């Protein structure tokens, strides 16, 4: 049995992280888990009642070369409390027990962080037009060699006449993977996921926009007074998730709700304009920014600012991209407890 504080254990702290923490033999450091990211800062859960806003120390910034050297949601970090605006300074990212990242096409060295220290990757797709074997395959690819176990959740069961056909298609393509059929209208179907959310375990929901990740997450967290994801409003007035956050479920285990991964494709389809509205090059650039939460306003390591300076990206094109982006989401800057 572990002798750690029950609260840290409930967040997933274990011998593995303790050993990593012990290797950092400096005094004055405390462990915390990154439960969310804001604009230019991270949220560190320290105790049951303390969530600190933290920034990366200059030293960590200088020591970090690749994107995945920086903290992401789910990471355990060593920090020092500090005065001023940011309440914590992050000095070390502790070793990861698992890591989920999305490899950027055409560049093997660049990955986009999704989450760290996740026990289960739950790939979410709905039993309707969204269902796409190739896409499911891409999500499963993220789970490969990540250290997390991978499972498939098929949502909106209530809207589907022949779910078994979908299950068969997945079986034919991907073999023996575990599949759950769920509906937000049938709570008992979601209760079957309980085994993923036992004490100290973290699961992440990944899938396209609109498949029902937040609906499920809200059920899992019985979200009344719990921390809820940061929500924006898309062009059709629907809520869409704009950031990744760790939330505690009704069964104690933790869930990470994430934004749908097709955001920029959605912009292209929505505006229905040709090449001038294809912003994949700009999108690729934003993935090169050092920080996943870069504001692109001369932030350290900002690829957009660099491209604007070098004139490889025109200010007009950058403005057009931002305009298109603002059409699908208006982030509310609020961290609710
Ligand atoms: N009929 C039915 N509708 C559902 C179900 N689950 C979710 N929905 C609806 O699907 C829509 C999208 O659900 P969300 O939970 O916001 O989807 P999301 O995956 O979080 O989307 P993003 O945050 O944009 O990535 C909402 O209108 C939900 O009410 C379900 O099981 N059955
Ligand atoms: Mg959502
Ligand atoms: Zn940037």
Image (spheres, grey):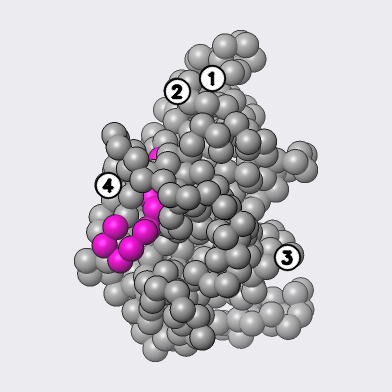
In this view, the residue in front, 62 or 312, is 62
Mark 1 CB near ligand 3 (8 Å cut):
yes
In this view, the residue in front, 113 or 265, is 113
Image location of residue 150, percent across then percent down: 64, 73
Q: Residue at x 34, y 72 (%)?
A: 221
Q: Alpha-carbon distance for marks 1 and 2?
A: 7 Å
**In the picture shown, does residue 12 fall above or below 181?**
above
Per the image, the residue denoted by label 2 is 297
Per the image, the residue denoted by label 3 is 144
| Residue 231 visible | no
Q: Alpha-carbon distance for marks 4 and 1?
A: 26 Å
Q: Tell me the element at label 3.
A: loop
Mark 2 CB near ligand 3 (8 Å cut):
yes
Mark 3 CB near ligand 1 (8 Å cut):
no
In this view, the residue in front, 125 or 162, is 125
Q: Which residues are magenta?
A: 41-50
Q: Is residue 47 magenta?
A: yes
Instruction: Rate crowding at label 2 as few (under 14), some (14 to 19) or many (20 or more) other CA atoms within 10 Å.
Output: few
């Amino acid at each position: 049995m572990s002798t750690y504080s029950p609260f840290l254990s409930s967040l997933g702290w274990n011998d593995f992280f303790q050993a990593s923490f012990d290797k950092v033999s400096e005094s004055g450091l405390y462990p915390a888990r990154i439960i969310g990211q804001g604009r230019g800062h991270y949220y560190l859960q320290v105790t049951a009642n303390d969530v600190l806003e933290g920034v990366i120390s200059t030293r960590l910034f200088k020591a970090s070369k690749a994107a995945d050297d920086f903290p992401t949601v789910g990471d355990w970090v060593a920090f020092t409390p500090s005065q001023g605006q940011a309440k914590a300074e992050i000095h070390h990212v502790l070793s990861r027990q698992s890591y989920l990242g999305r490899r950027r096409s055409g560049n093997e060295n660049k990955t986009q962080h999704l989450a760290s220290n996740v026990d289960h990757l739950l790939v979410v797709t709905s039993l309707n037009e969204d269902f796409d074997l190739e896409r499911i395959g891409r999500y499963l690819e993220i789970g490969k060699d990540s250290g997390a176990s991978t499972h498939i959740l098929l949502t909106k069961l209530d809207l589907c006449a022949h779910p078994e056909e979908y299950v068969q298609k997945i079986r034919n393509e991907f073999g023996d993977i575990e599949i759950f059929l769920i509906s937000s209208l049938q709570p008992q179907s979601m209760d079957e996921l309980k085994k993923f959310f036992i004490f100290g375990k973290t699961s992440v929901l990944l899938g396209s926009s609109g498949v029902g990740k937040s609906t499920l997450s809200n059920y899992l967290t019985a979200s009344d007074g719990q921390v809820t994801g940061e929500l924006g409003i898309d062009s059709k007035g629907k809520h869409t998730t704009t950031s990744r956050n760790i939330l505690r479920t009704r069964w104690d285990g933790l869930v990470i709700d994430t934004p749908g991964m097709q955001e920029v494709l959605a912009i292209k389809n929505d505006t229905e304009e040709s090449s001038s509205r294809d912003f994949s090059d700009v999108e690729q650039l934003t993935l090169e920014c050092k920080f996943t939460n870069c504001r692109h306003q001369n932030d350290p390591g900002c690829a957009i600012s660099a491209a604007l300076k070098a004139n490889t990206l025109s200010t007009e094109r950058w403005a057009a991209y931002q305009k298109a982006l603002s059409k699908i989401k208006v982030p509310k800057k609020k961290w609710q407890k």
